[in-house]
Amino acid sequence: MMYPMQVKITVLKKTFNSEFVDAYTEGEFKRRGCCHDFEVGQEFISDGHMPIGFSDWAWTDIQKYVVVLARGGNMLGVKPGTFVTCCTDGFRPVFYKLERIEND
């Protein structure tokens, strides 16, 4: 199913919570550093479906917001056609800016 509009997904920020990694992980998972799937500034375009090259985990977290924007909806308290969200990885969260691309 194609949605009426597309949404641009921009990677805003990558973070690393070393105190959580040190306290709650072990073995290979203790690897240091931010998420290795994305780079800050990287952009993707979605028509309501997961863009090629996008992380499955992150897509599961942000898909609902992308679909709302692609269908013309808005989130409360933010500029119309936009939203900022993040994946649910508490160790290495990545923040995304979502922007509806208005069709003329």
Image (spheres, rainbow, N blue to C red):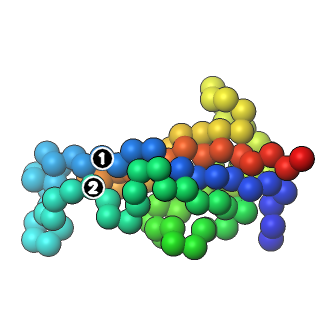
Q: Residues within 10 Å of mark 1 (few under 14, many from 20)?
A: some
What is the x, y in percent for residue 14?
35, 49
Question: In the figure, residue 30 lies in which quadrant?
Answer: bottom left
At label 2, the amino acid type is Cys
Q: Secondary structure at mark 2?
A: loop
Quadrant in the picture for the N terminus: bottom right
Judging by the rendered image, the residue that carries numbered circle 1 is: 15
Residue 52 tag number: none
Residue 23 x %, y %: 10, 51
- Give the camera-side residue of 19 and 32: 32
Q: Name the element at disc 1.
A: loop
Residue 75 appearing in the image: yes
Q: Earlier in the sequence, mark 1 or mark 2?
A: 1
Tell how many labels. 2
Mark 2: few, some, or many residues within 10 Å (few <14, many ≥20)?
A: some
Q: Is residue 7 left or right of residue 44?
A: right
- Who's the residue at 61% across and 68% down the image? 50
| Side of 68 relative to 102 (left or right) | left
Of residue 72 and residue 45, the one placed in the foreground of this image is: 45
In the figure, is residue 49 to the left or right of 55? right
Quadrant in the picture for residue 12: top left
- The residue under the point 24% across, 49% down is 16
Question: How far apart, in angstroms, are the residues tagged by discs 1 and 2?
Answer: 6 Å
Outermost residue toward the top?
Answer: 77
According to the picture, the residue beneath numbered tag 2 turns out to be 34
Callout 1–callout 2 Cβ contact below 8 Å: yes
Give the percent coordinates (x, y) of residue 10: 53, 50
Residue 78 vertical placement versus 40 (above, below):
above
At horizontal 60% and vertical 39% (from top left) the residue drawn is: 83
**Camera-side residue: 98 or 59?**
98
